[in-house]
Amino acid sequence: MLINIRHGAQSSPRSADILRLPDQERDEVLNHFAALTSTLLGIPTSFISVLDEQHQTFRAKYNTTLCQTDRKDAFCRFVVESAIPVIVPDTLLDARFTTNPLVTGEPYLRFYAGVPLINAQGKVMGTLCVTDSQPHAFPAEKVRLLSRLAAMVTVFLKAWQVAGLTDAVTGLPNRQQLIRHLDQLSEAGHSDVLRLTVIDCIDMPRAYELARALGMPPVEALLRDSGRLLQNKLALGPEKIFYTVATGRFAFLSRSDEPFSADAVLEAMRDVRPLAPEGLAMDLTLYAGDVCFTPAALPAQEALRRAVSALHEAISINGGARSFSEVSDSRRNGDFMLMNDLSAALKTGTGGLYLVYQPRLSLSDVQPTGFEALIRWCHPERGELSPAEFLPAAQLTSLMSDITDWVITEVIRQLRVWLSEGISLPVSVNVSVSDLARSGFIDHLDAKMAQAQLPPALLEFECLETELATENPAALAMMAQLRQRGYRLSLDDFGAGYSNIGYLRRMPVDVIKLDRALIADLTSNEASRIIASSVIGMLKSLNYVVVAEGVEIPEALDMLASWGCDQAQGFYISHPLLPQALKSWLSTFKYGQLGHAT
């Protein structure tokens, strides 16, 4: 049963098991205790050990190469079993040890003195011992000194346990303690299905604002208050431990048949509102994720990872609560690995990234007017990937700015090649609001263009997030600077979603690209024709260059031309082409052959 984890108020892992697992930092300190013990007692060898059912393991030692012995051969088992000091002045004179392999063979022990390390509950945690290959008298004062040294080790272990396994702010058991609990359940062969629920409750940006205004004490008080509030509201009972696993993030274990799913937690916490210090009310922003698992079958770290994965799924979709899903987790893990590969490809230039270019056509003289650069990826292992397979995941990372920089660099290089071949047509590049708001974006761009000796008019930027751009003063200022320096600017997907006339007055752009949804059914839907013709007329009256995207049939091209649309782009004109294929397309371009280019 899960209840067996808990031994008193907040004591966990069991202090009797504190030496069961190795810990490099702790054991380095214990090594110093071992050396000090040998020095003070004048005995050459000393060690601190822990026993399980099969072995004695040396957690710290001085002047010995032993790391582990069989329990049946361990002198220390007599200390553990009796919980009192055991002194053996001469092993050859003690019937318990005369045939012991540690006496008859290496290290040929002739003397042993060991005392127990006893915790506050009276349980033996391990032993502190000294040994020698020569017999020794060991008077009472030395036994007392060895016992005092053991008490010092015990005090250190208690302090280490509290410091390393308790959250300093909330006073609750921390993530390391949760992991140790799960390890204990696993080692005990716990086969019941448990649920690990993780709760995120603090709006961290708001908490940072609070810290900035009032300092850290109010934030820490808020975290403590939130932890207590969650525990009380959920009524977990004294048998369950509430953990702090990260700042503002808590967790607890329950049986899978208990009403503590992520959904149930959020329902129970509805309308809960802590009072921050200084009288500042601050709402809890609650999310929860859970996973059901069998401790004996799933490693502790993996159980926590799955619960946190479910939590982040809830946060990412603003969905409140989510249970772990193998399908969603596999997809996210795949996206993570893909983004790792994408990052490497952008840095090395050898990961299969390349550009294709889709022509734009003037509808007045039916001549090419430029191209749109589109990124493609031939993954070394997965093969050809469409942008839809990697760009949505990249948009959730910091890689989008790296992608933009890579595309711009490649476009400039290609423009330089084309210019040397007598091709002087502009190329448009997609940019996000975060790109436009980046400090130094235009200066780096100008430097690249100057190095390539290219005029700004050969580069056009398509803003993909119009609504966000209108709300970002830095992005609007950057767009104005780009336009002033001779670069062309366009709005993408006009007529979709948020699109309206109001933001046009705020956007310093030259070109408006109509969303393909406006073009898709022109030949079959009268309402679509009325809307498209009206939008084109309105944009032309505002002196914008109007480009229609997604043109796939000649009838649509003719209609657009009759309504005054300036340019068009789509599969009827040409599919996106590699640079060499595009060069061939340009050299053989004929209007009558449109619809055949691929």
Image (cartoon, helix red, strand yellow):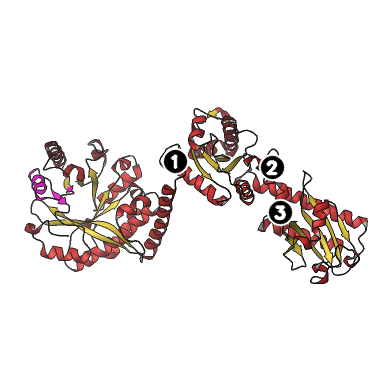
Instruction: Find the magenta span and give its range.
Output: 548-577
Q: Secondary structure at mark 2?
A: loop
* Residue 395 x/y as whole percent: 36, 50
**What is the C-alpha distance between the residues marked 3 and 1?**
38 Å
Q: Residue at x 12, y 46 (%)?
A: 565
- Name the image quarter holding the N terminus: top right
Amino acid type at circle 2 is Ser
Q: Residues within 10 Å of mark 1 (few under 14, many from 20)?
A: many
Q: Secondary structure at mark 1?
A: helix
Residue that mark 2 sits on: 11
Instruction: Say which mark, if any, is on residue 19.
Output: 3
566 falls in the magenta region: yes
Residue that mark 1 sits on: 314
Between discs 3 and 1, the one toward the N terminus: 3
Amino acid type at circle 3 is Leu
439 falls in the magenta region: no
